[in-house]
Image (spheres, coloured by chain):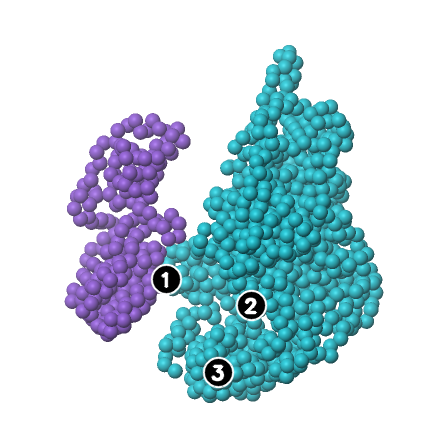
Amino acid sequence: MNLQKTTEKTGSVMVVGAGVAGIQASLDMANAGYFVHLVDNSTSVGGLMAQLDKTFPTNDCAMCVISPFLVEVGRHLNINIISNSEVESLEGQAGAFHATVRNDPRYIDIEKCTACGQCRQICPVTAINEFDCGLDLRKAIYIKYPQAVPLAYAIDRSACIGCGLCEKACLAEAISYADTPRRTVLNVGAVILSMGSSVYDPSGLDTLAYGRHPNIVTSLEFERILSASGPYKGHLMRPYDREIPEKIAWLQCVGSRDINRAGHGYCSSVCCMYAIKQTMIAKEHVSTPLDAAVFYMDMRTYGKDFDKYYTRAKDEKHVRFIRSRIHTIEPLKNGDLNIRYVLESGDVQEETFNMVVLSAGLSPPPSAIALAGRLGIDLNAYHYAQTADIRPVNTSREGIYVCGAFQGPKDIPQSVMEASAAAASATETLADVRWTQTKVRELPAEVDFSGQKPRIGVFVCNCGINIGGVADVPAIREYARSLPHVIHVEDNLFTCSQDTQEKIKQVLVEKGINRVVVASCSPRTHEPLFQETLREAGLNKYLFEMANIRDQNTWVHMASPAKATAKAKDLVRMAVAKAAYIEPLPQVMLDVTNSVLVVGGGVAGMEAALGVARQGYQAWLVERGHQLGGMARQLRSTWQGEPVAPYLSDLIDAVHRHEHIQIFMETQVVHVTGTIGNFTTTLVTQDDEGKEKSTVIPHGAAILATGGHEYAPTEYQYGAHPSVMTHLEFDVAATKQDNRLLSAKLAVFIQCVGSRSAERPYCSRVCCTHSLKSALWLKTINPDVQIFILYRDIRAYGFRESLYQKAREAGVQFIRFESENPPVVSLTPGDPSEPNSSRLSLTVTDHILQRPIILNPDLVVLASAILPNENKKLFEAFKVPANADGFLVEAHAKLRPVDFASEGLFLAGLAHYPKTIDESIAQAKAAVSRTMNIVSKTAIMVGSVIAVVNPERCAVCLTCVRTCPYGIPRIDPEKGHAVIAAVECHGCGVCASECPGKAIALKHFTDEQINAKTDALFQAA
Amino acid sequence: MIVADRKSLSEIQDMVRDCRKILLVGCKGCVTVCNVGGLKEVQVLAATLRIAAKIEGRPLIVEETVLERQCDPEYVEMLKPVVDNFDAVVSMACGVGPQFLSEAYPQQRFFPAVNTTFFGGAVAHGIWEERCAGCGTCIIHYFDGMCPVARCSKSLMNGPCGGSDHGKCEISRNINCIWDMIVRKKTEQGRLNDLLDIVPAKNWQTARDGGPRQSRREELIQNG
């Protein structure tokens, strides 16, 4: 794609780095009207997440959750994946950049390669498998993993000996040894950097003996060991002797929070959680008892449901958590490893483990640092992209945005959120060129076959020799000819190749074929491709059925060719039997209302409304109170020290002035109807005289940013003494230069007030950082003030660790307490004639001295929990779920962090979980991006594989209502039967299989179709 | 609704062991709603019986149908064209079904495929609980909406008894002591004094104790 350079604004964008963040950003922009060039320096997309085994805190399989995203990005008409490539330079300015991209050779033509794998079979050279972290071997010609996108092989020329065997074996003629690097110039309006992270290499930490002993592995290596597709096929074994370990130690903060040897002063944010996950998964992998011990400094389980996960590991899985940082690992001759550690009592312990996992931290990849240098964007001290808290995804160069772990170490949901945020920010100035660079597939009208008998065409694939080399393909083809309704059969060398597809299209039209069966590889990889071919020939894409005669047949029955042929015939007979009953499922177009309702006038709500407006669409902003700003009104500064007040007043001003925003103050949502693309919401506004006025708003999507508030403590003499205050009160007092702060000689901060308790078993995430920030401010205005921070774990995640370091350097003293033995604050009566003259006294048991310490503070600051705002009626009106703590529940904890399970509804800010202001802003922008996937379109397509209700059979028993995982079916009291909205149904089929009255059918999987298939199976061949 | 549980397969098999052709009749009423006797369950049982017969090498034809309700003669009559084509008919309705069927078709044999258990409701999907014993004289208003007749193991009118153990009934840890719940609710609502009044012995004549019952609504009965 060599385009001419232009200085005009363009509707194309470039995303650099195709990990989970890059994929999300690309999908968001491509679905909102922009053409995306997705550049990655690897042979396939997927990044680090593809290497993970499971993901916390749900223990979902990482590959299972990411692979649908890989497929979508791989097949998207408006995403151009440019693999094996580096961005060399970027000229021009925001709106009209020219990116020069170097395309390194893959030595295999992606267009021709069918990923049949014949080349790998024949390749004589083995090389280190980097995907399995070197724990396994691969061939010099390789594909990273079976689900890779693009699904094409590559040649590792550093290992290849140039023997030419693969070239001879490749029947698709895809090998091109002569490939050389090429250069491409892309015209793009904006750039998003999502280069992700590399894992810290602990080889430099000599006392940990990593690299010198095989049983000491990094956490990423351990992910591969646990993975079912990994080097040991999911069997937990230690590398040295492939024995099942009985004792494993995890050492935290390897390459993190270590300025001494690793040069990384920051916290990597994710290691505590992944270590907990690995302990639990490892225990599940072995039938023998496994002793798992985690050696840590602070347990940083600060995210949503993280603390519960930690508690579960401790209490239910009996994982040992030992607060000690290990200096040395001493390998023993039998492969075991000795560790010495210090207990809190000061006693030294020695313990032997069979295996040690180093919880290696994150660091930016060297290639990303180099690229940032070429692009001229500012990096922080640790070579991560520098951003401001109030603009969390903007780099220092206009038009270049950043998201994911290259902005700072973070977990998957935060990366995905930022990816969407970056997508919204990057396209804000390109709104007027939306849909100008995108492609539309021109398709012929669908032919109406109704009333016609089935005329089935069967195409049997040889897949090179993958199928034909094992099973007798001509025999399968001739067998197909004998089956009912079959009017055409043929076999192809590669049914998926471009030329075969063209031939198929011709034959479909010439012979009037109205149902198609392909017997080949797997619907997982190839069904969409064949469906596209059908559609291009004028057939509805559902008039297609596939028989998997490769992955589930010739690959697994290679040694029994005759039986493989017989099984292939069975599979083809079943596919043909179902094909006779399949029906076209045309989709219906529904118009979309191009506006977004935003509920909540805090920072998240205002950022969301402004984001929508700046994308060129109407935003309705609803606030139940009488002023905008929410909790931020009381906040003094962000964690990086940026003042909040000027940002907030600018934001309020911008929201008021924007022509596309209408604000409803003192207004509540009372009723919501409709579905994605077309909601109708009734608002009730209270006017000055207390009169109620109702307004009905049509909107295509909604964002709930209903916020949270600070817990009003009942503990630590709060309310009984003016010098006991919460964080927000401290901030307000600091702004007013309150004398209680200025004159304090001894200040004590108490952490986890109302958080991490039995009643509220979650961490409020922001309070550790807030205390550190406030303590440092006190030290700045009064260097002589003595400060104690009483804590359980200091959770200064990411770069916030720098505040912890600065606080220690500034002389702030830290005393850790156990939740069972919290500090006690009491009042010593003062002069009875003077109000507020009583003195504060505080007792806490010091964790090192193991003795109570008595302090007489002048100031006690309580790190009070963050609670979600009560909005029961509102949440009921939108039918969105809240968890036991009252926070809204997103569609998927990892990959859909701002979506609700109900389509068209999104969430942002504190209503989701406690978070800092930069995170709220990012989440709000992310929600905007998600709504653009809906409101930027004039219509959405509805229908196809969905559940339909036969009203006559419905017993209104509520089984569908109760079992639908998405909460879609409802009983219509007027119609007197269950109703499943076509636009919302996910087509999972749970209701159809559960319905006791057989009133629900899942289209394309009807009883008739499935029974035809099973009947055919048991019919003798 | 009336709640029922499916009988075991072996019990149903034993009932129809001498039959070569049977009809399974479901009901679209309560038993569909409690997921025990609707079309799906009819199809599942039919398939299971066919497979079981095949394993035993016994010929068995099983046909399936569902009636709107088996407790109304007009619906029961819909079986008329086919009912004699079978060696027996298995009803998946509550205990009312096979009886209405037997009365309509005295020449045919009818078997129940379910055990009818109680009047209750679904507290969650897949869990049904008893709420009403059909005693004929409702008194739940005295007990803040909770029925000690149906829900106390002893149907005590002046509870709780000594078997109330931390909110559970002594007969099972899975059964809440309804009297504990009544006392709690009365306490919460400040009406504990209500329980000072002794509830006199209940007249069980309106219940099953008074013999089989009939409900006559004169204004509905059509003469002639």
Q: Which comes before the other along the chain, label 3 or label 2?
A: 3
Say what amino acid the circle numbered 1 marks: Gly
Q: Quadrant of residue B87?
A: bottom left
Residue holding disc 1: A997
- Give how far across and how far down residue A789 sits, in percent: 65, 32
Above or below A496: residue B161: above
**Nearer to us in this view, A1001 or A114:** A114
Q: Which quarter shows the C terminus of chain B?
A: bottom left
Task: Name, please, the residue furthest toward the front.
Answer: A333
- Give how far across and how far down residue A112 sits, in percent: 65, 79
- The shade of chain A is cyan
Q: Are marks 3 and 2 in contact (CB under 8 Å)?
A: no
Say what amino acid the circle numbered 3 marks: Ala
**Neighbours of disc 3 within 10 Å: few (<14), some (14-19), many (20+):** many
User: Helix, strand, or loop for circle 3?
Assistant: loop
Q: Quadrant of residue B190?
A: top left
User: Helix, strand, or loop for circle 2?
Assistant: strand
Chain that is coloured purple in the picture: B
Q: Residue at coordinates 32% horizontally, 29% vertically from top-left?
A: B194
- Give how far across and how far down residue A42 sits, in percent: 68, 66
Say left or right for B125 vs A499: left
Say what amino acid the circle numbered 2 marks: Val
Q: Chain of mark 3?
A: A
- Give how far across and how far down residue A435 sits, in percent: 71, 65
Give residue A471's mark.
Answer: 3
Labels 1 and 2 within one chain: yes
Q: Residue at coordinates 79% horizontally, 65% vertically from top-left?
A: A88
Residue holding disc 2: A588
Judged by depth in the image, the label closer to the viewer, 1 or 2, is: 1
Above or below A58: residue A1000: below
User: Helix, strand, or loop for circle 1?
Assistant: loop
